[in-house]
Image (cartoon, rainbow, N blue to C red):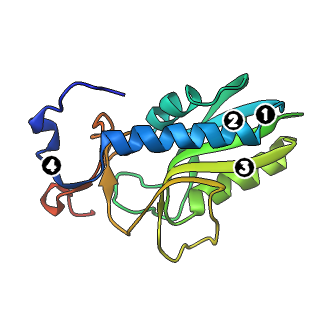
Amino acid sequence: MSSLPPDPSLYDHLDHVLVDEDSLRRRIREMGAQITRDFAGLPLTVVTILQGGAVFMADLIREIRLPLKLESISVASYHGGVESCGTVTFHQSRMPDLAGRHALILDDILDSGRTLDAILRRLREETEPLSLKTCVLLSKQLTRAVPIEADYRGFDIGDEFVVGYGLDYDGEYRNLPVVGVLKPEWIRPSP
């Protein structure tokens, strides 16, 4: 993660910073240590949900001190809005080969539960992993449309629309080195 001072202009669209760089770095180090202990000696594949999980994945896998394979799945559920539309679209036809391996599914945020549930169901139907565990950077504390919780969570947050550190709004803000709450005036009305 960056150790350079942040450019103030990167923060102009944020109402406030929810999770700063130091907190992200510290928590990801702790999560990596826990995952290393839990999967020691096991054949591990980390499956990242793109695009949002890419930044989290890059930092987390450097903290997992085990041999591992890396795969990705590309899905969409927000479709340009600020909340999940209820439909999960898979952008590829083939799922990663997880046969004979333990899989850790990595995502940026758990909110409605629809995306993670759809991915887990599809992986169980189409692959033969030894186990499936889930890991999210952020877990919204709300009543989910699908009752699911992650096995590993970075931070519990309220029901706010957040951007940065891989999380986006309409494809932007992923490069912020923090997680912040977007100012309402920067959110376009839904069509």
Q: Kindly identify which residue carries mark 2.
A: 36
Considering the numbered disc 1 on the image, is that residue within a helix, a strand or a loop? loop
The quadrant of the picture occupied by the C terminus is bottom left
Considering the numbered disc 4 on the image, is that residue within a helix, a strand or a loop? loop
- Disc 1 packing (10 Å; few <14; some 14–19; many ≥20): some
Q: Are marks 1 and 2 in contact (CB under 8 Å)?
A: yes
Q: Nearer the viewer, mark 3 or mark 1?
A: 1
Q: Nearer the viewer, mark 3 or mark 2?
A: 2
- Disc 3 packing (10 Å; few <14; some 14–19; many ≥20): some
Give whichever of 185, 14 is nearer the camera.
Answer: 14
Of callouts 4 and 2, the N-terminal one: 4
Q: Residue at x 20, y 58 (%)?
A: 188
Q: Is residue 182 visible?
A: yes
The residues tagged by marks 4 and 3 sit, at their Cα atoms, a distance apart of 35 Å
Of callouts 3 and 1, the N-terminal one: 1
The residues tagged by marks 3 and 1 sit, at their Cα atoms, a distance apart of 14 Å
